Amino acid sequence: MARSGASTTCSATALACALALAACAPGSNLPPVPAAYAGPYLLGPGDEVRIITFGDTSLSGSFAVDEGGHISMPLLGLVQASGLTTEALQTEIIDELKAKKLYLAPSVVIEVATRRPIFVLGEVQKPGQYPYEPGMTMESAVAVAGGFTYRAVKARVEVKRQEPGHAVRGQADPDAAVQPGDVITVLERHI
């Protein structure tokens, strides 16, 4: 009986030690990062849109969304783009063209030419900037960066994500969705 009690005490102590180590594992103190936005793609700084205005080549071309969230268009000046879908931006440009009496019935088509990149840092083989792809997960982002190093924490990553008006920092599981502009850091485990 004493032997069984000692075994139970050792098991309980081992479990307590394992839980204590898990609690101080890199990144475990971070809150979960907010879920990636699942709706239609919202434009933001770093994106580039292709705009075709039928009948006017000066209002057609590729336009970058600047740090302030605007695109600069001939005849219109700065047009707010950040936080809008391509359809909402299309409506905004059509309304501006009508309001300035440049066109009675303008026809405008907009598509995303280049999405803002993601950044994968830390314990990966090739840290750096990578193009965002729809449906990308944290694990696939790590794979694009060459995979984990032998020192990597594989159960979670640290993510810095831009939310409207501010950046948030948290942890995410490998199967969590990536959002354009995410800065993903693979943490180093204690050796």
Image (tube, grey):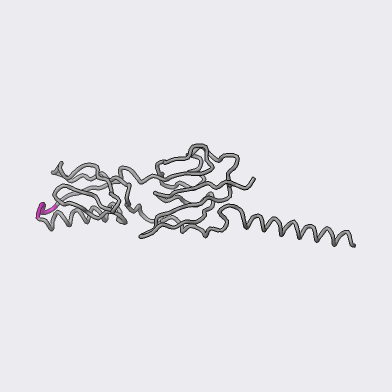
Relative to the observer, which residue lies in front, 63 or 151? 151
Judge from the rendering whether residue 38 lies leftward or rightward of residue 138; answer left or right: left
Residue at 44% of width from left, 48% of height from top? Answer: 183
Residue at 53% of width from left, 58% of height from top? Answer: 30
Relative to the observer, which residue lies in front, 166 or 32? 166
Q: Is residue 43 above or below residue 165?
A: above
Q: Is residue 97 above or below residue 60?
A: below
Q: Where on the picture, by quarter, is residue 82?
A: bottom left
User: How many numbered markers are drawn?
Assistant: 0
Whether 103 is among the magenta residues is yes
Q: Position of residue 2 (x, y in %)?
A: 89, 62
Judge from the rendering whether residue 73 lies leftward or rightward of residue 23; answer left or right: left
- Magenta stretch in the rendered image: 101-105
Q: Position of residue 141 (x, y in %)?
A: 48, 43
Residue furthest to the right in view is 1
Residue at 54% of width from left, 52% of height from top? Answer: 173
Looking at the rendered image, the quarter that the C terminus falls into is top right
Residue at 53% of width from left, 49% of height from top? Answer: 174
Judge from the rendering whether residue 92 lies leftward or rightward of residue 99; answer left or right: right
Q: Where on the picture, by quarter, is residue 130?
A: top left
Whether 146 is among the magenta residues is no
Q: Position of residue 135 (x, y in %)?
A: 44, 47
Q: Position of residue 42 (x, y in %)?
A: 34, 54
Task: Name the main secondary structure of what is drawn in magenta.
Answer: loop
Judge from the rendering whether residue 100 lies leftward or rightward of residue 144; answer left or right: left
Looking at the rendered image, the quarter that the N terminus falls into is bottom right
